[in-house]
Amino acid sequence: MPFVPGRIQTTPLPQPQLENTVSLEQALLQRRSIRSYRPVPVPLAALAQLLWAAQGVSSREGFRTAPSAGALYPLEVLLAVSRCDELAPGLYHYRPLSHDLLLWRSQDHRPAIAAAALDQECVYEAAAILVITAVPERTAVKYGSRAMRYVHLEAGHAAQNACLQAAALGLGTVTVGAFDDTALAEALALPEAVEPVYLLPVGMPV
Ligand SMILES: Cc1cc2nc3c(=O)[nH]c(=O)nc-3n(C[C@H](O)[C@H](O)[C@H](O)COP(=O)(O)O)c2cc1C
């Protein structure tokens, strides 16, 4: 595991809901990039559902909601929390196997993330930000020079899952790829082997 904090503090997440009255077709129809959010908290259950949709475990063997080349799972999802009544502001690492959050860094990281994301307003406004990062070496061990291609494809799968889940929950989100790689890696205190790939600010739509 690349994220090993000095002090281990975990938060169990509400179990994912496996049924919804919104059909897949309705979620596909409703998914839209939403960039304005109300300054209100997002429930922990909704954030947990988004994390599960992005990278949760969905089989006894440990396979996940999103496909992965060779089932090598190079993606690591972080959650930057700003406004959630059940969770202190901070930067958390989602652990799919235990479906919980490991505190990576305390304090609200949203302003630093937004600054790295070229000051995009939607990132400043978010109640929370899903940060998709990757450890490309996991995939490179088997696939060599095709690893980065696979990592980016997989990030797209995970992000789309989260977008559709957000649509089904009535949450707003947008996929953000415009950021300064070095500034974002610094803002997230990423270990050397980990690269930032994609941001999904989340909030209650205006
Ligand atoms: C790879 C990628 C990067 C994107 N980066 C940004 C971004 O940095 N900021 C932003 O506001 N939207 C970003 N978007 C969202 C697109 O602008 C949006 O998907 C497009 O306008 C179509 O609108 P829709 O998502 O509502 O269908 C990105 C989309 C993709 C696929």
Image: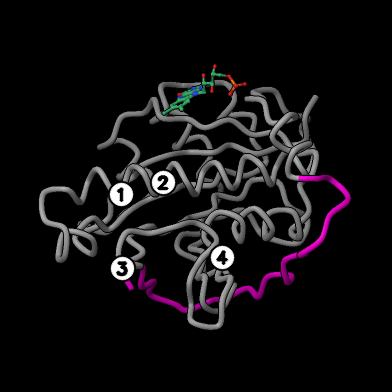
Q: The disc labelled 3 sits on which kind of residue?
A: Pro
Residue for badge 3 = 2
**Residue projecting furthest to the right:** 21
Q: Where is the C terminus found, in terms of image quarters?
A: top right
Name which residue lies at 69% across and 47% down.
165
| Disc sitting over residue 56 in the figure | 4
Crowdedness near tag 1: few (<14), some (14–19) or many (≥20) residues, C-alpha within 10 Å:
many
Q: Identify the element where label 3 is drawn.
A: loop
Residue for badge 1 = 151
- Whether disc 4's CB lies below 8 Å from ligand 1 is answered no
Of callouts 2 and 4, the N-terminal one: 4
The range drawn in magenta is 1-23
Q: The disc labelled 2 sits on which kind of residue?
A: Ala
Q: The disc labelled 1 sits on which kind of residue?
A: Val
Horizontal placement of 101 versus 31: left or right? Answer: left
Q: Where is the N terminus found, in terms of image quarters?
A: bottom left
**Residue projecting furthest to the left:** 145
Q: How is the image coloured?
A: one colour
